[in-house]
Amino acid sequence: MRILVTGACGFVGSTMITHWLTQGSDYQFVGLDNLQRPGSDINREKLQRLGVELYHGDLRHASDLAVLPKVDFVIDAAANPSVLAGLGDRGQSRQLVEHNLIGTLNLLEYCRTHQAGLVLLSTSRVYSIEHLTALPLTVAEHAFTLDTASLDASLSATVSSLGINERFSTQAPISLYGATKLASETMALEYGKTFGLPIWINRCGVMAGAGQFARADQGIFSFWVHRWAENKPLRYIGFGGHGHQVRDCLHPADLCKLVEKQLAESVESDKPRLVNVSGGIASAMSLAQLSQWCADRFTPEQVGKDDADRPFDLPWVVLDHSLATKTWGWQPTISTTQILEQLAAFAMDHPQWLKATGGDR
Ligand SMILES: NC(=O)c1ccc[n+]([C@@H]2O[C@H](COP(=O)([O-])OP(=O)(O)OC[C@H]3O[C@@H](n4cnc5c(N)ncnc54)[C@H](O)[C@@H]3O)[C@@H](O)[C@H]2O)c1
C-alpha cells in the first residue's frame, strides 16, 4: 500500500513513518512537508536516509498536491497544532485557517482525484471550552480529578471517570485551532460520504515521545522534560499556580497500531468513522506530578507560579478511548512512565534540542 503522509517531517508524521519502516512494514511512503516548523528539517534528513520519497510542498497550495504521485491512503499529520495559533494581529488567524482547513480541503480534492482514503488526525481541542471548564473537579494527589458524584445528570452520557467521550459538546468557543479541526472533520466526513472515500477521524489526546518539538503551548510533556533537563525555568500558569492541571498522554507508535487497522478496513465498513484516540485515564498526569517525576529523574528544581488564568487553558482533559477499544480492539500499550523515560533519555542526548526546535522562546 502506498501512503502519503502530510506533515511527514513533524513529530507525529515522522515518528509514525519511522516506526513502520523500522518494524519491517511493507507500506511505501510519500511524504509532504513545508518545513515551517523549526526542527522539521532534522526529520527530513532522517526520512531521506530511510528512503522516503519526500516532497517540499505546502497544503495551502493545490498545485503542490497536483504534482504528487497517486497513493491509496493519506495520513494527514500537517497542521499548525497550537491552541494559541492564529491569535496574532498580522493575518495569523487567516494563515491558521489556510493551513489547517483549506489544507484539508485541498487534500480531500487530492483524495477524490485518486480515490484515496484519508486518516485525519484531529484533536481533543474540538470539545467545548465552556463545558470543559464547568466540569466538577476535586484535587487529589496534586492533580485535578473529575468529581463524578457532582456531575450533572445531563452530562453523564458524555463524560465519566474514564474521560470525555465522543458525545461531549463541541459547542463554540473551542479556540481557532479547535475550530479549524472540527470544520476539517466535517468536510472529511462529507467527502467520504459523497464520493465513496474511506475516511477515518482520530481525535487524538496529547501525544508525546522522543524527538518531539516542544513549546509551552504545544507538546507540553516534551517541553517540561526538556526544560527540566536543560535547567531552564518553568512556571505553573493559571488555576492558582499549583500545577494541578491534567492531560493524558499517547505515544504515536500506539496510534500506528490503530491506523493499521483502519487502513485495512473496507470502504463499505460500518464502523464509526470518528473515535477518540488517547492514552486515557491510565496515562493521565498533572504538571505537579510531572515535576515530581522530573525531580526524581534529574534533580529537584523550583517551579515558579503564575496564577493569572490564560484564555483556552483547561484544568482537566482526559479522553475516553472506549469506543476505539470496542470498535477496533485497540488499547494503548506504552505507559506515560515509558514515554517520559524515552523523553528524558533523548533530552540527555540532545542538550540543545529546545534551541534547535524553537522551544527556548
Ligand atoms: N502532538 C499532539 O499532542 C497532538 C495532539 C492531537 C492532535 N495532533 C495533530 O496531529 C498532527 C501532527 O501534530 P504534530 O505534533 O506532529 O505537529 P508538528 O508541528 O510536530 O508537525 C506538523 C508538521 O506539519 C508541517 N506543516 C504545517 N503546515 C503545513 C502545510 N500547510 N503544508 C505542509 N506541511 C505543513 C510542519 O512543518 C510540521 O513538520 C496535527 O494535525 C495535530 O493537530 C497532535
Image (tube, rainbow, N blue to C red):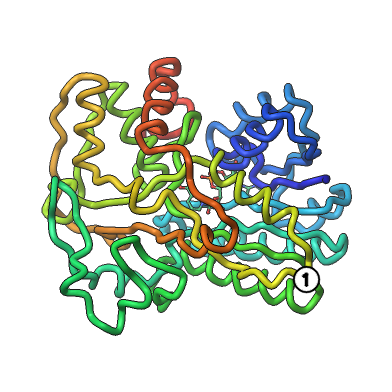
Judge whether residue 209 can be spotted in this image.
yes
Q: Which residue is mark 1?
A: 268
100 relative to 261 in the view: left or right: left
User: Against 74, is 148 above or below?
Assistant: below
Q: Can residue 89 be seen from the camera position used here?
A: no
Give the residue type at disc 1. Answer: Glu
On screen, residue 6 versus residue 210, left or right, reads right
- The location of residue 305, given as percent across then percent down, is 13, 43
The 10 Å Cα crowd at callout 1, few under 14, some 14 to 19, many 20 or more, is few
Residue at figure coordinates x 67%, y 69% from the top left: 188
Q: Is residue 237 above or below residue 291?
A: below
Picture residue at 74% right of the left edge, 77% below the top: 193
Q: At 67% from the left edge and 60% from the top edge, which residue is drawn?
A: 103
Which residue corresponds to the image point at 56% horizontal and 59% vertical from the top-left? 202
Q: Is residue 14 above or below residue 170?
A: above
Q: Position of residue 23 (x, y in %)?
A: 68, 29
